[in-house]
Amino acid sequence: MNSVIEVAALRKTFKGHDGTSRAVLKNLDLTVGAGEFLCILGPSGCGKSTLLNVLAGLDKVYEGRASVSGGRVGYLFQEPRLLPWLTANGNLDFALASCKVPTSRWSELKSRYLAMAGLSEFRDYYPHQISGGMAQRLALVRALCVEPGILLMDEPFSGLDEITARRIRSDLLAIWRETRKTIVFVTHNAYEACFLADRILVMSGGAFQHEMRVPIARPRSYDDPAIFTFSRDVIKAFGDEIERDPVPSAATESGSVNNLDRHTAARMNI
Ligand SMILES: Nc1ncnc2c1ncn2[C@@H]1O[C@H](COP(=O)(O)OP(=O)(O)OP(=O)(O)O)[C@@H](O)[C@H]1O
Ligand SMILES: [Mg+2]
C-alpha cells in the first residue's frame, strides 16, 4: 500500500499565556496508507486537533516532517464552521467553487450528500435556522461534496443523536468503500473507532502510545458482537489513557508506535 501521509519526528510547541512553551505534539511518527481508515483515539487535550491542523496544512509552524499527498484534503472540523451569511446550498457552492469542482457536477454531488445527511429539505436554510447536529451534518456534506482523496475528521459525530450517528457512520463506511478515500478520524469513542477503523492509534499526552489493527471483517454491522468484544478489550486495556486528563510528562515523550506493538499486544492479551 502506498503511503499518503508521512509524519516523522513531528513536534509542536505552543506558548502559554505566561510565555512558557509547552510541547503539545512530541516527536510523532505516523504513516497512513492510501485508502486506509485510521482512527486516533485519545482524551481531551492530548493534541488530536493540533495534529489534524498540521496534516491539513493549516498550521505550518512545527518541527519535523509532515507530508500529505494523494489528492485534495477535506477537513471536517470539530465544530461546523459554516458561513453564517450563506444558506446551506450557498455554503456548499462556496466550497465547490473554492475547490474548482466543475459546475456541471455540483447538482449531483449536493443532492447525493444532502440526501445522505437527511438535509435535502433544508438546502435553503441559513446556519442559524438549523440545529447544532444539522449544522455538523451540513459540514460533513460540505467536506464530502468536494470529493477529497484524504478526509480528516475531528470528532464529527460526537454532537449527533445516537440514531443519526449510527446511520451516518454506516453511510461513511459505504462512501469510503466506494471511493477508497484515505480517512483519518479522531474520536473519544472506542466503539465508534472499532466499528470504523482498519487501525487505531491511542494517543495521550501528545504522543502515540499504542497501535492496533481491528481484526473484524468488512463489511461490518454496527451491532456485530465482535465489535462489542473488541471495543471492550480496548477499553479494558487503554481506558485509563483514553479517559484521563492528559498530563504532559517525560514518560510519554516517545511518539513512535512501532516499538510498542508487543507491549500493546500484551496489554490486550492478543
Ligand atoms: N493556539 C493554541 N495556543 C496555545 N495552546 C494551544 C493552542 N491550540 C491548542 N493548544 C493546547 O494544545 C493542547 C492540545 O489541544 P488540542 O485541541 O489538539 O486537543 P484535542 O486532543 O483535540 O482535545 P479535544 O478532544 O478536547 O478536542 C491543549 O492543551 C490546548 O490547550
Ligand atoms: Mg480537538
Image: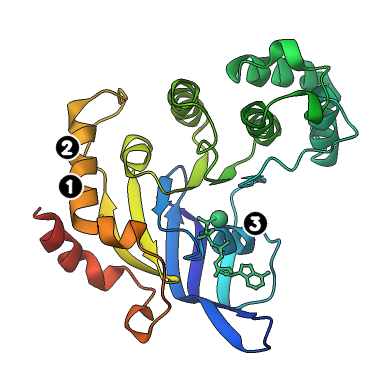
Colour scheme of the picture: rainbow
Which residue lies at the image location 34% right of the left edge and 51% below the top edge? 200
Vertical side of 183 occupied by 9: above or below: below
Vertical side of 170 occupied by 66: above or below: below
Which of discs 2 and 3 lies nearer the camera? The answer is 2
Q: In which quarter of the image is ligand 2?
A: bottom right
Distance from Cα at disc 1 to Cα at disc 2: 6 Å
Label 1: few (<14), some or many (≥20) within 10 Å? Answer: some
Q: Which mark is on residue 233?
A: 1
Which secondary structure, mark 3? loop
- Give residue 74's quadrant in the image: top right
Mark 3 vs 1: CB contact within 8 A: no
> Circle 3 sits on which residue?
56
Which residue lies at the image location 63% right of the left edge and 14% below the top edge? 115
Q: Which amino acid does label 2 sit on?
A: Thr
Q: What residue type is labelled 1?
A: Asp
Label 2: few (<14), some or many (≥20) within 10 Å? Answer: few
Q: Which mark is on residue 229?
A: 2
Q: In this view, does 182 lie to the left or right of 131?
A: left
Q: Where is residue 171 in the image (x, y as percent from the top left)?
A: 49, 23
Residue farthest top in this picture: 121
- Give residue 162's quadrant in the image: top left
Distance from Cα at disc 2 to Cα at disc 3: 34 Å
Compare residues 263 and 136 and report the one nearer the observer: 136
Residue farthest right in this picture: 85
Q: Which amino acid does label 3 sit on?
A: Ala
Of callouts 2 and 3, which one flags the residue occurring earlier in the amino acid sequence?
A: 3
Mark 1 vs 2: CB contact within 8 A: yes
Q: Position of residue 12 (x, y in %)?
A: 58, 77
Which secondary structure, mark 1? helix
Which secondary structure, mark 2? helix
